[in-house]
Amino acid sequence: MNRVENKLVLVTGASSGIGEACAKRFAACGASLILVARREERLLRLQQVLASETDVSVHAHRVDVRDRESVEGLAAQLEKTELVPDILVNNAGLSRGLCKFQEGEFVDWDEMIDTNVKGLLNVSRCIVPMMLTRNSGHIVNVGSIAGHVVYPGGNVYNATKYAVRALTEAMNIDLVGTNIRVSSVDPGATETEFSQVRFHGDKKRAKAVYDGFEPLTGDDIADAILYVVNTPAHVNVANLVILPTAQRNPYVVHVKGGAGRKR
């Protein structure tokens, strides 16, 4: 059963990777879209593609989720035009560096905390009250296996994803008694632009992360998110951890021609 048809879905970080895959997947299911990202050129290109391939309405907004005023402006505009999202996918997030804590860069830490934690807070705080006015809605926070197991060099990124996990639980508790559901989808190794961003554009190093095994793709995560929001109204998938078959935790990945290895 398709329960997302004719729903309105807001996706952050929609210009690439998991966010772009979600936009395409939801559009294919007949959901209208509000796409949010920093990279306007990519966002508008995606909007044009979806408009030409589907019959759904697609709204694109250049918004940096770290900028609270910008997020508040978007929310005010949506409320004024009665575009209250039925589903919010908090996907915007990133990692910077893979250094030991004592070698970490403050600028990298700030970007991760401001995007992964404060960005999620900014968007959710502005959208949830709109959902409460009609007592319906579904929030999906894209977390990570990094929010379950800490790995060397992950430190601050791990901390931000543990925060996403905690916030998902807290939002669920605070919204008890309402019809608003809150879920997190926590991927393992997923080949998008994630590693390129982590390694500051070093494509060779980023590609090496996935050598010898088949990682997940943005489409895989979009499918998982679609499953979560397509459940009946009385079902709330609080947390879904999704890994490639070759991976069993952040440390153990089966590489072709070898045994399980620590990464």
Image (spheres, grey):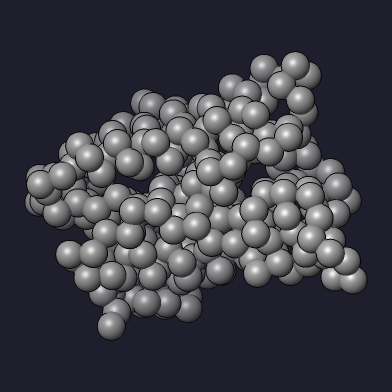
Relative horizontal placement of residue 215, taking residue 122 as reference (left or right)? right
Residue 5, position as x, y percentages in the image = 28, 75
Q: The N terminus lies in which quarter of the figure?
A: bottom left
The one nearer the camera, 254 or 217, is 254
- Count the marks: how many? 0
Q: Is residue 99 above or below residue 222?
A: above
Q: Find the residue positioned furthest to the bottom.
A: 1
Residue 39, position as x, y percentages in the image = 58, 45
Relative horizontal placement of residue 24, taking residue 201 as reference (left or right)? left
Picture quarter containing residue 109?
A: top right
Q: Is residue 83 visible?
A: no
Residue 135, position as x, y percentages in the image = 11, 51
Q: Residue at x 56, y 55 (%)?
A: 187
Residue 155, position as x, y percentages in the image = 65, 29
The one nearer the camera, 7 or 194, is 194
Q: Is residue 37 above or below residue 51?
A: above
Q: Residue at x 32, y 64 (%)?
A: 229
Q: Residue at x 72, y 40 (%)?
A: 198
The one nearer the camera, 53 or 234, is 234
Q: Is residue 60 above or below residue 232?
A: above
Q: Is residue 107 visible?
A: yes
